[in-house]
Amino acid sequence: MSGLLCYTLPMPELPDLEVIKEFLQAHVIGREIAEVEVVRPIVVRNLAGGDFASRLTGQRIEQVSRRGKSLILTLDSGDYLVIHPMLAGRLHHAPRRERRLRKTFVILRLADGMDLRYTDARSMGKVYLTDDLAEVPGLGDLGPEALDPNLTLDVFRERLRKYRGEIKGILTRQSFVAGIGNAYADEICWRAGIYPFRKRPRLSDEEIERLYGAMHEVLNEAIATLREQVGADIHVEIRDFLKVHRKGGQPCPRCGTTISEIEARQRLTNFCRQCQPGSLIK
């Protein structure tokens, strides 16, 4: 059952976290952390020394940024609170009196009467406190952001050359480009009309160009959609607008063919066999 559960929980990816970042920029920057409650310490990683709650208390949030699939809160002391949700971590911005969600792990009680709460249905995420971002595992190994203007088609093509595996797996490698996970990799491959299990050396220059364009289209469209739909409910993940991911058995919105669903490479993959022809047989 636990293996199946991991497929049913959507992992926050670049579009989700970009919209959450924008919400937090509008609602928590300048707020003082009046009190901290660590409800379940298993997710806390204190790399700064001292007591986690005591060190955070009294600090002011100066900036909110995103790097890959992590959110970074810059504090006025020079400390950073880095939230890496992993599979099922969520942030909940709520009035103090509002009942906390199940599996709430850390609560920042802000001086304006609101809470910023970290919840995690799978207890897999991490909340790091550090005064040096280089200490946060994996953060320094990230490739360029998927929507970084400096990631031109030529740079994208050049970075692809060192990989020889399946294209979906490459898209989700954070050392290649940062921010794309399982769901949006499915969407990008479908938009580009590329079989997700195709090996990179078999992609033509034209297909790589399509893939690059699809990455930008899918991620930018998702951000725009989420900006309209999420509002203050940043703890709720919205995926109903996706075209193929988690849509196995439904008709492809482009050609009407039934969308396939395969559990392979320890992940769930959805694609259209008509629009994305290919075979797992090597």
Image (cartoon, helix red, strand yellow):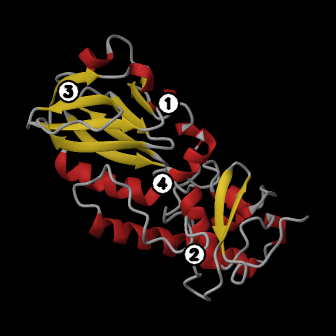
Any part of residue 248 in sight: yes
Q: Which label was assigned to residue 214?
A: 2
Which is nearer the N-term, disc 3 or disc 2?
A: 3
Q: Which structural element holds mark 1?
A: loop
Q: Which label was assigned to residue 13?
A: 4
Q: Which structural element holds mark 2?
A: helix
Residue drawn 23% across and 60% down?
231
Relative horizontal placement of residue 14, taking residue 255 as reference (left or right) = left
Residue drawn 51% across and 44% down?
87
Q: Quadrant of the N terminus?
A: top right
Q: Amino acid at mark 1?
A: Val
Q: Amino acid at mark 3?
A: Gln
Determine the CA span between mark 1 and mark 4: 19 Å
Closer to viewer: mark 1 or mark 2: 2
Q: Amino acid at mark 2?
A: Ala
Which is nearer the N-term, disc 1 or disc 2?
A: 1
Q: Which residue is mark 3?
A: 59
Q: Which residue is mark 1?
A: 136
Residue 94 percent across, percent down from the top left = 18, 43
Determine the CA span between mark 1 and mark 3: 20 Å
Q: Amino acid at mark 4?
A: Glu
Mark 3 closeness class: few <14, some 14–19, many ≥20 residues within 10 Å: many
Mark 2 closeness class: few <14, some 14–19, many ≥20 residues within 10 Å: some
Instruction: Work out whether 148 lies above or below 139.
Output: below
Of residues 164 and 278, the one drawn nearer to the viewer in this rendering: 278
Determine the CA span between mark 1 and mark 2: 31 Å
Residue 38 percent across, percent down from the top left = 30, 21
Residue 140 percent across, percent down from the top left = 55, 38
Q: Which label was assigned to residue 100?
A: none
Of residues 254 and 165, the one drawn nearer to the viewer in this rendering: 254
